[in-house]
Image: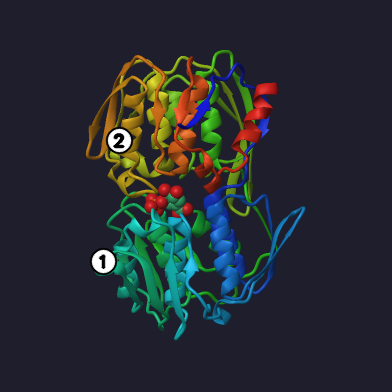
Amino acid sequence: MGIMIQPLKQVRGEITVSGDKSITHRAYIFSSISRSSVLIRNPNEGADVKHTLSIMQSVGAESKKSKEGTLIKGIGLKNIKEPENVLDAGNSGTTIRLLSGLFSGIKDKMFVLSGDSSLRNRPMGRIITPLRKMGGEILARKNDTLPPLVIRGKKLKGIQYKMPVASAQVKSAIILAALSAEGKTMIEEGVRSRNHTEIMLKAFGGRIETNKKIVVYPAEKLENDEIFVPGDFSSAAYFIALSLIVKDAKLLIKNVGLNPTRSYLIKKLKDAGGEIKILNKREKNGETFGDIYVENSNLKGITVRKEEVPFLIDEIPLIGVLGAFAEGTTEVRGAEELRVKESDRIKLTVRNLRALGIETEEFKDGFRITGHNIRYGHVKTAFDHRIALSFIVFGLASKKGVEIEEINSINISFPDFFDTLRVIKNG
Ligand code: S3P
C-alpha cells in the first residue's frame, strides 16, 4: 500500500518555491569559514542542507534562525575545530563531497564523514583521487570507494586537474581544498557543471578566475554580510512541468534561480513547444533569478544529448515523466551519471514509466519513450526525492492518478511541495 496521488483539476495563480538547495549548501559553508556574520535570506529548508549546517556547527560555526533567514557567525578557515564525533551527511552527496574537500586542508585535525544507506553506496573515488594529488589523507570503505570517509587534515598543495566526469560536487571539493593549499589550483572541465561555488567564492571576496580553466588561489579574507538565495530551479521545474501538461494551466513562479548552468530545461521545453516566458530578470550576489510564466502547451518529445546532460542533471527523471505526456519519442542519452545518484535514476524512471503503461526502452546511459498508453500503476521511489517528486507530477497530471510507495523523501529538497500545490489548486 502506498499513497494515492489524485489528478489535479486546475493549475492557476502565482507561487514561489523554496530557496535553491545547491546555493544554500554553499552559503552555509562559505559563511562558516568567513570571518563575518552573514544573514542568509530564503535558505532551502530541506534535510540535505540541514546536514551541512549541523556539520559546520560541529566544527565551530554558530547559527541562529530568525524570521529573516539563517544568521551564521563564521569562525575563519584556520579556526575550524576538530569535531568530537562522526559527522552525519544524511542523504546528501553535496554535503559529504564538498566538506571532504574543505576538511582535507585543515591541518592535523581528524574528520569522519558518513551518511544514510544510499549515501554509503555512492562513489567517493572521484573526490579521493584529486584530494590525494593535493596531498590529502583520506580513507574510505571498500578499497577507498565508499563512505564512511576518514580524513586527517594536511598541508595541501595546489594542483592542475582535468575533470574526468562533469561534476559540480567534485569541482567544488577541489575548490574548497584549494582555499587552504599552497599555490594556485587549476581545474579543467570538459563540459561545464553548475558554477554556484565559483560564484559564491567571488561573493565572499575570494580570488578565483573562471575563464577556460578555473584558477583558485588560497583564501585570504572571506567576508560578506548577506546572501539572498533565489528559488530552486530544480523545484520550480516540477511546477513548470505540471503547468505544461495540465489542461488550461497558467502559472507564474516568482524569484526562481536562472543560472544558465541550471535552467537549460527551459530552452529544451521551449524547443519542444512549451509556452514559457521569463520576466523581471535580475541578479544578486552574482546569481541570476527572475519570474517564470508557463501555460499549458502541446509538447513534442524531447531529445537530450550527452553534452547537455550536466545542465539538466537533476531534471532527467522529470523529462521522462514529460515524455509520457508529450507527442512522439523522448530520448535521453549520455546520462550514465544518473545511475550513481541518490538511487539508480535511470532504472527507476524506466521501471515506473513502464508500470504506468508507458513503453520505454532502457539503455546503459538513458532511455527512450515510444508508447503513451497511460494507465494507473504503483510507483517505487527507493526514497529518492527527485523520483518521488517527478512521479507525483505524473499522478497529478494523469486522468487516473498514481499510487506512490512513499512521499516523505521530498523533505530532502522540497518540504513545502504540498503547501505550494494547495496554492495553485485554489489560485
Ligand atoms: C550538485 C551537483 C550535482 C547535482 C546535485 C547537486 C551540487 O551532482 O546532481 O543534485 O550542489 O553541486 P554531481 O556533482 O554529482 O553531478
| Furthest residue in direction right, as rendered | 67
Pick whichever of labels 2 and 1 is earlier in the sequence. 1
Q: Is residue 102 above or below residue 243?
A: below
Tell me which amino acid carries mark 2: Arg
The residue tagged 2 is: 305
The amino acid sitting under disc 1 is: Lys
Q: In front: 33, or 261?
A: 33
**Left or right of 188 in this view: 264:** right
* Residue 412 place in picture, x, y as percent: 52, 48
Q: Is residue 321 above or below residue 407?
A: above
Residue at 37% x, 79% y: name it.
157
Query: x%, y% of residue 89?
Result: 48, 61
Residue 410, given in percent of the width and then of the height, sits at 53, 42
Farthest front residue?
A: 1
User: Along the line of sight, which residue is nearer the eye, 298 or 290?
Assistant: 298
- Residue 366 spot, x, y in % from top left: 28, 36
Q: Residue at x 35, y 34 (%)?
A: 349
Query: Dot 2, crowdedness within 10 Å: few (<14), some or many (≥20)?
Result: few
Mark 1 crowd level (few <14, some 14–19, many ≥20, 10 Å Cα): few
Q: Which residue is drawn at the image coordinates 46% and 24% (left, top)?
A: 402
Can residue 275 be seen here? The reply is no
Vertical comparison of 245 with 3: above or below: above
Q: Left of 179 or right of it: where is 335?
A: left
Extreme residue in the bottom direction: 108
- Report, in whole angstroms, how far the alpha carbon at label 2 lies from the one at label 1: 33 Å
What residue does disc 1 label?
Answer: 142
Figure quadrant of residue 18: top right
In the rendered view, tell whether residue 163 sits above or below residue 368. below
Looking at the rendered structure, the secondary structure element under dot 1 is helix
